[in-house]
Amino acid sequence: MDANGSYHAAPYSTNPQPSAQSTMLYACLDCGHHNSIKPREPIRCFECGYRILLKVRTKRMTQFEAR
Amino acid sequence: MIAEVPTMAIDLVEFHENTSMLVDEYLAHRLGMIPLTSHKVDDFKFTRDCTCTDYCKECSVEFNLHVKWNEEGTRTVYSTELISSNKDVVPVLDSDQDRGIILLKLRKGQEIHIHCIAKKGVAKEHAKWSPCAAVGFEYDPHNNLRHLTYWFEKSIKDEWPLSKNADEEMENDPDAPFDFTAEPTTFYFNVETVGSLHPQNLVDMATRELQGKLGALQLALEEDQNPVSNANMDDGEPWV
């Protein structure tokens, strides 16, 4: 929603996210804790040690063609 | 009627939140297929002909849907829950009791928040814009002209039931001599729509579409045959 309270968000107009946007967060499949893992680091939850992490869905609006 | 009569259909879907079990692409495709009432389609422009850069209320209609389910059980979301920005373009309904097409189902804690943009289009581009569900065509229901040779076991009459259109015509006397020069003169069309337009309107609009095409052809032919009439138009030849 923009300042006028309407949904006129221009499609694809979002600027490329600044690369400095905090490191990617991955959710643990077991406990749900959000981990930030860096390259070459073991894929492992800091909280519970579970080895399956999920990429979380973007909070940005996504647009699709309905066809 | 099938391919070139314009209607409205959802063309773009913006997902703000989708935690339902259906993926975005699947839902977007599903939303596109919803028939929208299009009797006011002539008031809209094609987005490509519109002066706006993206979309505006002259070439599109917006729909919003925001459902969050926090109770036990399953919540069914119907097409009637799409909130239209234009009361003339809404999802097609059978009756007042009809709740429309089921879009998706939500379980406890799931949420859907979307914004759809419906645009004017023709089915040549995508079948979702087709106002037409079925077109039937028939002539000579009694087979008086003998254009058909029916296969049969014992009796043609018993094995090949006549269509409804047979009531409109008389059957020729089977003993009368066969007229080889006879031509079909009456044709029967059966039109069924998806609900976006009334069948009567659809035939009218299709006829208008055809008229426009023939008009353009006639103009082009006239111009071709009387080059004098457009002598003021430079055809790019340097000596004119």
Image: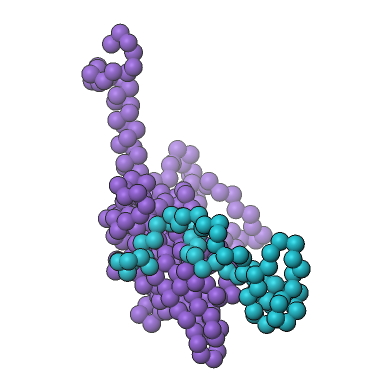
Chain colours: A cyan, B purple
Tell me where residue B74 appears, x and y as whole percent. Answer: 54, 86
Toward the top, the furthest residue is B239
Tell me where residue B173 appears, x and y as whole percent. Answer: 46, 53
Toward the bottom, the furthest residue is B72
Residue B26 appears anywhere in the view: no
Total labels drawn: 0
Tell me where residue B33 appears, x and y as whole percent. Answer: 48, 63
**What residue is rendered at 41% in x and 49% in y?**
B4
**What residue is rendered at 45% in x and 52% in y?**
B123
Q: Is residue A4 above or below residue B108?
A: above
Asked if residue B29 lies left or right of residue A13, the reply is right
**What residue is rendered at 52% in x and 47% in y?**
B146
Q: Is residue A23 above or below residue B101?
A: above
Hey, which quadrant is residue A30 in on the image? bottom right
* Front residue of this view, candidates B128 and B170: B128
**What residue is rendered at 32% in x and 35% in y?**
B216
* Front residue of this view, candidates B203 and B26: B26
Q: Quadrant of the N terminus of chain A?
A: bottom left
Residue B19 appears anywhere in the view: yes
Asked if residue A63 lies left or right of residue A10, the reply is right
Q: Is residue B52 above or below residue B212?
A: below
Q: Is residue B43 above or below residue B184?
A: below
Hey, which quadrant is residue B11 in on the image? bottom left
* Front residue of this view, candidates B68 and B76: B68
Hey, which quadrant is residue B87 in on the image? bottom left
Tell me where residue B42 appears, x and y as whole percent. Answer: 29, 54
* Front residue of this view, candidates B231 and B227: B231
